[in-house]
Image (cartoon, helix red, strand yellow):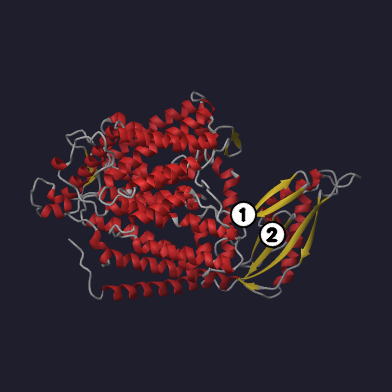
Amino acid sequence: MRWKTQPHGSKAAALVVLAAAVLGIVIGFAAPMLGGTLYRSSATVTFTAVQLDDRPPTVSEARHILVRMPSWVKIVGSGEVAGEFPLRAGESLSAVEISGVNSFVLSLTSPTAQDLPARTTAAANAVITVITRGETPAGTKTSRVRGTVTDPGDSTVSLTLDWAMWGAVLGAVIGALLGWLVCALRAPGRWVEQLAGGGSREVAAGRPADSEDREVGSAQLTGGDDRGVGAASLTGGENREVGAASFAESVDVELRRLASAVRTRRGFAVLALLAVAVGGYVVTGSAWPVFLATLVAGVVSRKDPRWIAVAVVVLGATVLPEKLDLVKIGPVTPTVLEVALLIGIVVVWRRPQSSVFTWPLVGVTAAVLVGCLWGFAHGGDFSVIADTARALLIVPLGFFVVHRAFAGRLPQLVAIVSVGAAVASVVELAASALHIQRLLVDERTSVITGTDTSEVSRLSAPILPLWGPLLILLVSGAFPTKPRWRYALLVLPGVLHEALSFNRSTWAPLLACVVLVAVARFGARGVVKRLIVAAAAGGLALGLAGAGAFGSTGEALANRVTSVFSGKALAEDSLADRERENNAAMATLRQHPLTGTGVGVPYGGEIVSYDDLHDRTVVEARPWIHNQYLRMWLWFGGFGLLMIGLLMVRVASVVVHSWRERAPATVPVVAFGLGLACLAFQSVLQTTLIDRPTLTAVALTLAMLGNAVSWRSVPFAQVARTSLPKDRIMTR
């Protein structure tokens, strides 16, 4: 059925969203109050080194405190301390290290405020007693450290109220999003009219749909047609099956057209231009060869804007560095990517093409601008504010350019992106083998797994974030799998690149999405068989890699994979770093739950290093945080969190309605939606959400999803199988 917008639907939806937000505020505010009021008082404990002989304290003694401090912080909550300082009912002790000054802040939390500061000071002295006793060598009476309560217990503060305000803001955001999602699923707005529904019924040889076609069947992908194209689709009526088969057939035609096009004169010219741009950068290290190629794309885009859209993707998510700076203009140095975006906006501005994501992206843009202004008003670093704003605006601007440039040509865009991604990863792998450093963007030379350090190349490259959504599409059944050799050439570079990134936090959500697609495609029984085969093959490969059959890189990769099951990953410093980041961010958000800190304002995270030259500990503000949702909340406040959530709600709504409408491109819509979900899950444990390559991948995937919801299949007989004219490329 086609959804019809109701005349009073917007008012009813507004009331539902408002009621859900108010309910979320009440629940979020009341939840911390259920356990009663909690109070807290804090004291500062500082340690100094004690030389056990007559010599003055040495550097090694001072460093001993620096090394032991994280362990002492954990001792605060131990039973040994509880034996020295008995806790009352409902009380707890915690500590947070103050980096660089050999101190930590001890906090006593209690349901009563009576004599709490004095008890906090007593607890600090008890902790000092336990620590100095543990640092006393056997057979001696002198401890290697001496502790002092430099700041006794301070005035009592109410923790419950801080948590209640934090919970109220979070509850309002979650409530509003849930209310919006319910309205979007049951009574969507006018945006739903842009979805192509039931269009593939025209493809089924003119056969009218009967009542059985309207039944939603089992959620599985079936597939393969008799033409050798891996056309698979989500069953639930012939609409999805035929539409997905038609989409895969269209992508197959575009892939063959690309193969024919590169053999034309214009194709050779395009390849030569790309070679000059990338090769010129490799040889000179300058952005100007790339800039000149971008200008050429801009000139030809006056007649065909797809060229500048492809240039945006190449500049943002291939092998070139994310920031190819040009000439400094005041406090800002524009990049080649930004120039390409500007050209793209100019050439597509008058192309009439609306999208279901336009207004959610306008909201996200408004949140970015508000967060930047708030950070500037509160003393944020201007360079950080400017760079962050320019990076985050890649999503709406890149979406605008790519979506409009390739409107109605989604299979062609998929073909270009899949081939381009495979070529980019092959170039990156070759650069690693040939040690071409300028193409090894963000490469690391070692991998730390547990307590082991392997000296192997850990590849990154701007193309890497795009492989998550792309691999999900490639295995969904909406992509042609025959001929097998071509499919392997497109898939294997991405799989190998993902493996050599050594990113476990990227592997996990990607694997989960792939398994989910496999369950939908083959059914539970089919997936079990394939999982058994995959597990056997994977176990054999890991065994050979662990035995050294694939060299040191294979050993490191096997160690990395098995660390998830052996527990080695839990012993790594990276988990402790993430926990400290989250604790610092949460402490700041409890103080500013509604407005956040603004962009460019430190949130409390720290980077600690030791200056050997001056023999001192250096503490700097940590500019990043792994949990990107905490970062968004810190930067843009509750409003920004709501706007980002509304974009996610729109994505989920589009996927659900495409399924209900039996849209021709249901399979790619679901695949692109899962691709965005994969990036969203990765953002919990990765710092890369605000990197330009990841933002370009988000913009590109969102643009492909926006075009997929309105894509209509064509009869197979009408899909041209002829190659392009000998002197033309990308003409249809």
**227 or 315, nearer to the observer:** 315
Q: Position of residue 140 (x, y in %)?
A: 85, 45
Q: Nearer the viewer, mark 1 or mark 2?
A: 1
Give above or below for 401 relative to 226. below
Would residue 514 be seen by someone viewing this image from the given angle? no
The C terminus: image quadrant: top left
Q: Secondary structure at mark 2?
A: helix
Pointer 1 with pointer 2, Cβ within 8 A: no
Residue 529's x, y, as percent? Answer: 30, 35
Which badge, 1 or 2, is on the more N-terminal residue? 2
On residue 86, the disc is none
Judge by depth and name the residue closer to the eye, 171 or 143.
Answer: 171
Q: Amino acid at mark 1?
A: Arg
Question: What residue sits right under mark 2 in the picture?
Answer: 82
Q: Position of residue 235 (x, y in %)?
A: 21, 47
Position in image of residue 332 (x %, y %)? 55, 56
Quarter holding the N terminus is: bottom left
Residue type indicated by callout 2: Ala
Between the C-alphas of marks 1 and 2, the distance is 34 Å
Relative to 535, 659 lies left or right: left
Q: Determine the secondary structure under disc 1.
A: loop
Q: Residue at the left extreme?
A: 207
- Residue under label 1, please give it: 622
In terms of image quadrants, where is residue 659?
bottom left
